[in-house]
Image (cartoon, rainbow, N blue to C red):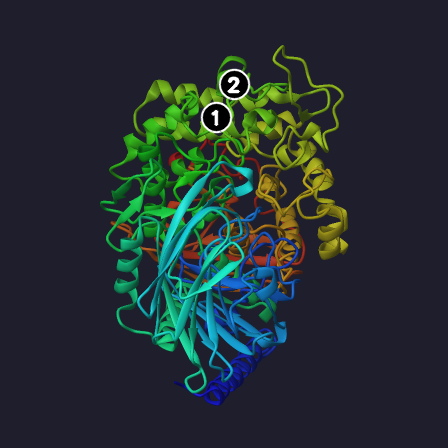
Amino acid sequence: MRPLVGRMRTRAARAVTSVAAAVLLLGGLLGPPGAAAAPAAEPASLVNPFVGTQNFGNTFPGASAPFGMVQVSPDTGGQGGYDYAQNTIYGFSQTHLSGVGCGVAGELPLMPTTGPVTDVNPEHYRSGYSHDDEEATPGYYRVGLTSYGVDAELTATERTGWQRYTFPATGAANVLFNTGKANQKVFDSEVRVVGDRTVEGRVRAGNFCAGKDEHTVYFTATFDRPFASYGTWRGTTATTGSREAAGEGGNGAWATFDATADRDVVVKVGLSYTGLDGARKNLAAETGDSYDFDATRAKLRDTWERQLDSVRIGGGTRDRQSAFYTALYHAQLHPNLAGDVDGRYTGFDGRTHTATGYTPYQNFSLWDTYRPQNQLLELLQPRVARDVALSVVGIGRDGGWLPRWALAESETNIMTGDPVTPFLVEAWSKGLLAGHEEEAYALLKRNATTTPPADSPYNGRSGVDYYRRLGYVPSGLKLGEDCAHKGGDNDCVHPASATLEYSAADAALALMARGLGHRADARMFAERGQWYRKLWDPSIAQFRPRTADGAWVTPYDPVEAGRQFHEGGAYQYQWLVPQDPAGLVGLMGGRRATERRLDSFFAYDKLLTDPAGTARRDWISAPYDYYGKPTYNPNNEPDLHAPYMYLWAGAPAKTATVVRAAMTLFTTGPDGMTGNDDLGTMSAWYVFSSLGLYPTMSGGDFLAVSSPQFESAVVRIGRYGTRQGGTLTVTAPGASDERRYVRGVAVDGRELPRTWLPWSAVAHGGSLAHRLGTEPGSWGTGPGAEPPSVGGAGRRGPDVV
């Protein structure tokens, strides 16, 4: 045992070291006038896991390995499991998702208590705590539980969660396992006390966002010493000496220790989605006989240092650097390992499979992550991105259909459109589906042209039959009659946005079809990639839903748009034509008319004088208020790429102004997130935009170029297969909120006259040297400087540059 006073001294020493590092860092940042700022040291020290834990960012502050199966974190209540505004904790559960918009995961909360175990209601045994006695860094969390005088610490490996409790001197130090409590519906559970050191069981849960999904997680937990007594409970009845509890409703178990002398208790929990045998193997493989909490914590810290060191930034304030590395951290928490150490995983057919040649992953918020998060992983962690893509293909193989929002081993049917198509086409375009291209294409084509069979749990493209016949999904369809409905969300409820998303997905699929030699399919999908035009009403110059007979829906307010666009109105969705921005500019009346429309959308004149205030007052109404304003909504995904539409309007300088204003919404406080982080999507937007690069179209194989936030960034391009990686160096001397306008860019020493780069220009490293000014210049304003319209009638793409 390590005495508590020694641990307190260790924490004090760490605090002094952190302060000293901060002083050194700040001194570097404030160095001689005009000097380049020192690069940020120890990126993990700049991460604040509490960012996004308040005001519906729905992140979690606990410990997780990058893309780990386990996310062990405190639970206070709220959608993300932890709400910074609440002041009590009812447990430390093993699974969390960062930034989702509904209650999810939170399975198996453990809770240390003292005294007799009689009241097993978590609302009663929860403990108070203070943020002044709480800390979190990548891979580690600690808090003092005031109700019991217990110090709780958390860390993890990829498939195991570790907890260390320091109790007051007591003969009744308890650890409660509540298998009947989660942050979503628990259908049933089992728990068993095994011997004098182990507790095992399972939890079957689901109904994410009112979906019909379900999954089962298995666990085995072992302690560093024998417990003195134990018991289980069913409902509200606790039975000392009982070893088993199972069924619906509340179930749980506890172990009690004598902490009068040895006050530390360490428990490590192995998880699996295949069964108890998998959980035991995972625990044994990743932890062996060790219960060394500090060594496990140090190893995970080193892992996060390497992960975050993939981008080294220089310049900017400490707060901006902290916001950047916190975003980079959040963007690499998901997707999550699905398989055991031996490659076994549970498929979407409910059977156990063994992955060959890849590591299986799960938890795919595709409607969100197909935009920038997928591409960020391709850049920094291509091996993970490849395994993720093959895992999605595996879902189609095992479950018979491709997913939209996959949680563990089941489809939730949450969100609409067809996000899996751009997601997989993007992976194909980077060579990450090698050996599986035709299998993936066949699944994508079936998904894009037909609906799932009646006995399938998937909604799929529920409006595709109407879309094929009319060129759009019509308004007025009835679920269960006109469109099959398997729970969750449905395209037929949001037909206008479904049409735009189908069209964008088809344009992406056309690229894959062409690349694989399916010429007839390529022509068909390319034509469908232009069907966004069928909802363009020239009389109001807006997208507008139509009925099956072709009539425009009347009356019509584009702000709310009858809620026929999903989580946004016509103003937010007017830019969702990533495949053909040039065609959209033509519909809007040309470059100058589009620029004026963008100015109105962003309240541009106000941004010039009060960017932060305008972003908060004019753009965002409130979390989840998607239909309240005709302006940019950067707390949601559909218009994330809209700042870059200025590039097609011939006004790239304005992109820099809008992006800088949006960045003010990312702060270092608990409310420092624009909205739900959606498994790292918003964070990935921040990372890419900080580098002055942005992927506007999945599968398009190009990056829009704009103004970097920092004076320098050194990006370590990930290695995979024949891709040897490399180092991309981005420089922008004097970059600041005022000096934000691009006056010129050199790529590997050659001037770049365009506002975009082919992906190949950065995939192996190189240099991007920006010259910035305090006033807009002419860079990127000429005809032909805009990025490609890959799905346009007159296609121009990076493959022909």
Q: Is mark 1 on a helix, strand or loop?
A: loop
Q: Where is residue 8 in the image (x, y as percent from the top left)?
A: 50, 86
Look at label 1 and name its amino acid.
Arg
* Residue at 57%, 64% in the rendered image: 50
Residue 467, label in figure: 2
Quadrant assignment, res 306: bottom left
Q: How many marks?
A: 2
Above or below, 783 against 51 in this view is: above
Q: Where is residue 395 in the image (x, y as percent from the top left)?
A: 35, 37
Specify the farthest residue to the top. 549
* Residue at 39%, 75% in the rendered image: 228
Does the image show residue 168? yes
Does the image show residue 39? no
Residues under numbered marks 2 and 1 in contact, where contact means CB atoms less than 8 Å apart: yes
Q: Where is the N terminus found, in terms of image quarters? A: bottom left
Residue 107, label in figure: none
Q: Report the front residue among 399 and 416.
A: 399
Q: Report the front residue among 486 and 416.
A: 486
Look at label 2 and name its amino acid.
Tyr
Q: Where is residue 444 in the image (x, y as percent from the top left)?
A: 38, 29
Residue at which label 1 appears: 461
Left-right relation of 663 to 431: right
